[in-house]
Image (cartoon, rainbow, N blue to C red):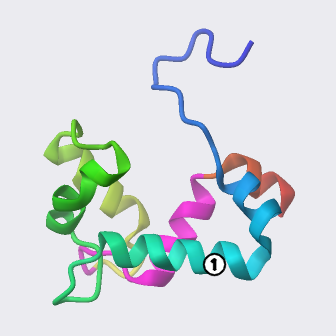
């Protein structure tokens, strides 16, 4: 049974369902919308501060500062301390085991 013996909170991976319903272009459009919702409007990237400010929309308001820093650091491939739209999309795919299996 899934989840038994795991200490991490359960995470429902909805990207494969979204991909199936929306198709590739629709999924990318939705990821782009998610990026725009979370980004710092002045900087055009997702920062730890913008993620913290908008976390409640995702039900993540209880995350600690160090957890938010880790989330940004996980996807920050260019080392600038923020997520651009491509880094965000790549991170969402990497965090989706179901979608990675289908790829």
Q: Is residue 9 above or below residue 30?
A: above
Q: Residue at x 37, y 79 (%)?
A: 36
Where is residue 27 shown, x and y percent of the image? Answer: 67, 72
Q: Residues within 10 Å of mark 1 (few under 14, many from 20)?
A: some
Q: Residue at x 46, y 25 (%)?
A: 8
Q: Identify the main secondary structure in magenta.
A: helix
Where is residue 96 shown, x and y percent of the image? Answer: 64, 52
Which of the 4 image quadrants contains residue 47?
Answer: bottom left
Q: Which residues are magenta?
A: 80-95
Which of the 4 image quadrants contains residue 69?
Answer: bottom left
Relative to residue 5, is residue 71 drawn left or right? left
Relative to residue 39, is residue 31 drawn left or right? right
Give the position of the N terminus as an image quadrant.
top right
Q: Residue at x 20, y 63 (%)?
A: 48
Does the magenta run of residues contain 90? yes
Q: Is residue 42 above or below residue 62?
A: below
Camera-nearest residue between 99 and 69: 99
Where is residue 4 shown, x and y percent of the image? Answer: 62, 10
**How many numbered marks appear?**
1
Q: Residue at x 27, y 75 (%)?
A: 82
Check disc 1 and report the residue beneath it. Answer: 28
Camera-nearest residue between 83 and 80: 83
Camera-nearest residue between 22 and 73: 22
Where is residue 103 shown, x and y percent of the image? Answer: 83, 64
Which of the 4 image quadrants contains residue 40?
Answer: bottom left
**Disc 1 secondary structure class:** helix
Does the magenta run of residues contain 41? no
């Amino acid at each position: 049974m899934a989840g038994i013996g795991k200490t991490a909170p359960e995470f429902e991976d909805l990207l494969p369902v979204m991909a199936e319903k929306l198709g590739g272009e629709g999924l990318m459009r939705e990821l782009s919308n998610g990026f725009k919702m979370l980004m710092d409007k002045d900087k055009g990237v997702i920062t730890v501060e913008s993620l913290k400010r908008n976390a409640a929309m995702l039900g993540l308001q209880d995350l600690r500062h160090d957890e938010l820093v880790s989330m940004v650091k996980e996807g920050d491939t260019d080392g600038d301390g923020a997520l651009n739209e491509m880094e965000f999309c790549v991170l969402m795919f990497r965090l989706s085991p179901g979608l990675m299996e289908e790829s």
